[in-house]
Amino acid sequence: MENGGFVMELEDSKKADKQTESDVVASTPTHTFEEAVSLVPVGKFHYYMLLVGGLCFMTVMVEVTCVSIILPSMKCDLVSTVAEQGMLASSGFLGIVLSSHAMGFFADTWGRIKTLRAALAFAAISSLISAFSVNIWMMIFFRFLTGFLISGGQACVFSLTGEFHGNKSRTKHVTLLSGFLPLSIMYLPTLAAFVLPIRIETVIFGMKFSSWRLLLISNCVPSLLALFGLFLMPETPKYVLIQGQHDRALEILRWMFVKNTGKPVSEYPVRHITIQNNGANLANITGIKDAVKLVWNQTAPLFYRERCLHTINICIIQFVVLGIAQGIFMWFPTLLNEMVSTKDFPVDVCNTLSNMDPTTNLHSDICNGIVDLFPFMVIAAVGGAFTFFYLFFSFTIDMIGKKNLILTWIIIATICVALLHWITNFYVNIVLLTFTMSVGNVGGLISTISMEFFPTNINAMGMCFVMMMGRIGAVVGSNVLGLLLFDYCELTMWVILGIYAVVFFMSCFLPVSKYEQRNKVVHATSN
C-alpha cells in the first residue's frame, strides 16, 4: 500500500515544478513581431531575397508582354486574323485577372513560398509548350494559361518581401522590388534584338523552328532562376507566426540574424514573440462548404467598415493608372514605328495616330530576317528611364512620403499629356510619352501602401485583389484606350487629363501607415 504522505508530497513537487516553468516563461522578456524582425539588421539575406523577388517580378512582365514583341515574327508561321492577334496580345493579362484572387487565397492559406514555387514551375512549363504551338488557338490557350499561373509571381512577392522587413527598411525594399518591372522592359527588347534576326532553318516535330520560338524559350530563364532561388528561402516568419508556429518563426529570425551579421545565435536578443494565431489554413478544409467559407472569410475582411472605403479607393486608383499606362504602352511599338518613319517632319502624336492604319503590317521584311533594331533600342531606353524612376522613388520615399510621390508623379504625367497636344519634335515626344507611361510606376507605390494597409492574415489576398484590379485596368486599357487614341486622339487626351485630376483628388485620401504617422509626429515635435 502506497504512503499517502509520499503521494501528496510528489503532487506538491509536480505543482511546484509547473509553477517554476510558468514563472520562467513569464519572466522571459517578450517582443512583438515588429520588434523581433527589426532587431535583424538588413544584410545578405535581404539582398538575396530582393534579387529573387525581383526575378519573380521580371518573369511576370516578360511573360505577359513578350507577345507584343514576337507578334510580327509569329505571323510569318501562324496564320491569324487581326482579331485573333488582339486576343493573343491580351490573353496573358486576362489569365492574370482570372487567377489573382485564387493566388491571394493560396498565399494566405498555403504559404507565400509554396504558392510562388508552384506558380512559377507550372507557368514555365506552359510557356515552353506555347513555343511549340502549331496554330494560333494553341498559342492563345497556352499564353492565357501562362498568365493564369504566373499571376502569383507579383502580388505574392510584395507580401513575401514585406514580411521579412521591419518598418524602417520595408518601404524602401518593396519600392526597390518594383524597380525590377522596368528592368524587364530593358531585358525583353534587348534579348529580342539578338534573337529575332537569327535565321533558323531547323524543322522540329514537322514545324519550322523560327527565331520567335527561341525567344519564347529564352524568356523562361528568369522564371527558372527565380524558382531555384525560392527553393533556398524559408517561409516568411510573420506568416509562420500567424499560423501559430512560434518556435519555427523564432528559428527563421535567428537564421536570418546569423546570415546577415555572422554573429552566433546567442547574440540575437529575442527569446519569445507575442503569439499571433488568426491565420487561415488549408488543413482546416474538409469539403467544398469549408473551402467556400474559407475563401469568403479571407475576402470579406477587405471590405470591413473600417477599411472598405480605403480598399475601394486603392483599387480604383490602381485600375486607372495601370489602365492608362498599359493602354499607351501596348500600342507604343506600333506608334513608335510610325513616328520613326516621320521623325524628320514636324508632326504631333495625334496627327501621327490619325494618319496611320494600325492593322497594317509594318514589318513585311521580318519574315526574311530583316529586323529594324531602332524601335527595340528605344523601348529598352524607356525601360532604363522607368528603372531610374523607381530608384529615385526608393531613395526618396522616406523623405518625401509615398502619398506625396504619387501626387507629384500624377502632376508630371498630367503636364506631359497636355504638352503632347502641341509638341511636334520626335525626340521630345518620345520623352513626353515615356513620362506619360511612367504613371504606371505609381502602381508600385500604391502596392506598397496596400501591403502596409492590409493585416498579415489577409495581406496576400488584399495585395492580389488590388493587383487584379490593376490587371483588369491593363486589359481594358490595352483593348479600349488604343482604339480610342486611333479614332478620337484629341478627345481621348483631354479625357485622360480629366481622369488624372480625379485620381489626384482620390490620392489625397490614401491611407498612411502608423509608422509614417508616428514619424510625422516625431518630426513635428523635434521642430
Image: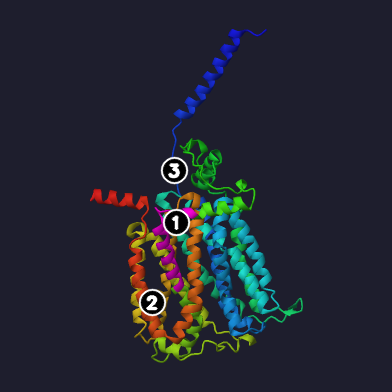
User: Pointer 1: what residue?
Assistant: 303
Identify the residue at horizontal 54%, vertical 68% (top origin).
61
> Helix, strand, or loop for circle 2?
helix
10 Å crowding of disc 2: few (<14), some (14-19), many (20+): some
* Residue identified by numbered label 2: 496
Closer to the N terminus: mark 1 or mark 2? 1
**Residue placed most toward the observer, 373 or 61:** 61
Q: Amino acid at mark 3?
A: Leu
Write down the region rendered in magenta: 300-323
Q: Vertically, is 221 above or below 423?
A: above
Residue placed under numbered mark 3 in the picture: 39
Q: Is residue 127 left or right of residue 90?
A: right
Q: Nearer the viewer, residue 477 or 58?
A: 477
Give amino acid for label 2: Ile
Q: Secondary structure of the magenta portion, mostly? A: helix
Which of labels 2 and 3 is toward the front?
2
